[in-house]
Image (spheres, rainbow, N blue to C red):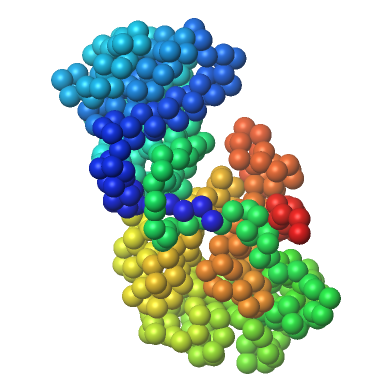
Amino acid sequence: MRSYYPCEAVRAAEAPLLASLPEGTLMRRAALGLATVAAVELRAVTGGVAGRRVVLLVGSGDNGGDALWAGSFLRRRGCAVTALLLDPDRAHPAGLAALKAAGGRAVPARPEHLGDPDLVLDGIVGISGRGPLRPAAADIVDAITAPIVAVDTPSGVDPDTGAVDGPAVSATVTVAFGALKPVHALASPRCGRVELVDIGLELPESRLIAAEAAEVGAIWPVPGPDDDKYSQGVVGVSAGSAKYPGAAVLCAVAAVAATSGMVRYAGSASAEVLAHRPEVVAAPSAAEAGRVQAWVVGPGGGTGTEAAETLRAILATDLPVLVDADGLTVLARNPDLVRGRAAPTLLTPHAGEFARLTGARPEPDRVAAVRTLAAEWGVHVLLKGHVTLIARPDGRVFVNDAGGSWASTAGAGDVLSGTIGALLSSGMPVDLAAAAGARAHALAANLAASGGTPGVGLQAASAAPVSASAILASLHDAVRLLRTYMPES
């Protein structure tokens, strides 16, 4: 698992090291890692390091000191280094002295002093900084055309929430010191590639984590020698209607694709579902569907009295239940249906549905918002978005960066619900099922956008918009690819 730590926790972990090490040791340790990454980037962009032009954007805090020390190391490797000081009187003294001793220049931060660098280091503000860039810094950042390496976090982006409310840096690479911070997951487009430099921090267990591809592949249920269609999980899908039969098809077919178990469909779109997947067992209602191990309810099911009664009946069972789409609208009017429910419940809203459930949108602090809903209602919550968040009632949150926005298309949520529902029926814990399903769904969207080439879907110029049907068609390949990352036994 990748772990992300709030800035308060990182500062607490730094404190004993700062107290025990000689002054400046921790900063130089971080700066050496920063300079190493910057040199790698210079070589990738220009073919070399010596003779290249590097500009440092230097604020008044420790991030400015990190940039200055890194600049001194790059100068010793033959780079021409110029520091633009945003507050010359408050620049880090030791870092500034080190840069000048190495032969670097320091000038006031003005756009005309930027020149034409090969690389820029963003040391404007660090993890204590909040709010957008100030005008002087924003004018310089706006004029930059070279790649930017952000020092720990991109300036102007909230390090704990990833929120941006004004001018901010968009980095090519971000070099994180000691620990990944929430911004590295929540605002990944602003961070670019993230490189972690170990500076010796001892950190507690994190409450914000991301599953690696190999971990998702390792837990994905596949049939063993003693399995049959029942032992691998039977999921019930109550979705779709005469008005929205497509939701039933997308949800049920995704459940079929996700595992080797069994799918029981309950609803009025049986003919359409069976036309696409005859292996589905269909019934007119949830009461007549037969035994299942988990339920998916809501997509395209309507919000009237009949839909509300279906939701009520399914939530009255002792089975895991995923509630999505129209089911969330019904639930917003009847929250007591899930509050305090003993059996596992997963709500899967997008931001608008989240607002209907809670009365407020989840921004700017999406992690805090999803934790609050999960804790107050006693449910698991999957908040959709470019970065999907899955919160447990106890406050632990999985984060999944989709690596693109290709799943922002009608019906993609129905595919996600069916995928997760099938994993729930296999007996997988709710948070792991949601995290694994979200990861596979995002990968399927990227594969579909790229024409099946892994990784290409992340590059907008190399991909094309896709439909939910295309995402569904790529789900098998996504699962297969995730399982290729598993280590050989």
> If the image is split into quadrants, where does the C terminus sit?
bottom right
Seen from the viewer's position, the closer of residues 415 and 318 is: 318
- Work out which residue is located at the far right of the displayed protein and give it: 225
User: Is residue 201 among what the camera can see?
Assistant: yes
Seen from the viewer's position, the closer of residues 90 and 199 is: 199
* Residue 194 in picture, x, y percent from top left: 49, 38
* Residue 54 in picture, x, y percent from top left: 42, 15
Residue sitting at 61 percent across and 74 percent down? 428
Whether 308 is drawn above or below 59: the answer is below
Residue sitting at 65 percent across and 55 percent down? 214
Please tell me in which quadrant of the rendered image residue 187 appears.
top left
* Residue 133 in picture, x, y percent from top left: 27, 32
> If the image is split into quadrants, where does the N terminus sit?
bottom right
Whether 241 is drawn above or below 359: the answer is below
Please tell me in which quadrant of the rendered image residue 288 appears.
bottom right
Residue sitting at 35 percent across and 8 percent down? 103
Seen from the viewer's position, the closer of residues 226 and 315 is: 226
Position of residue 351 in the picture relative to residue 58 (left or right): right
Whether 245 is drawn above or below 446: the answer is below
Position of residue 450 in the picture relative to residue 26 (left or right): right
Question: How many numbered marks are there?
Answer: 0
Residue sitting at 23 percent across and 14 percent down? 108
* Residue 397 in picture, x, y percent from top left: 44, 62
Seen from the viewer's position, the closer of residues 87 and 369 is: 87
User: Is residue 354 among what the camera can see?
Assistant: no
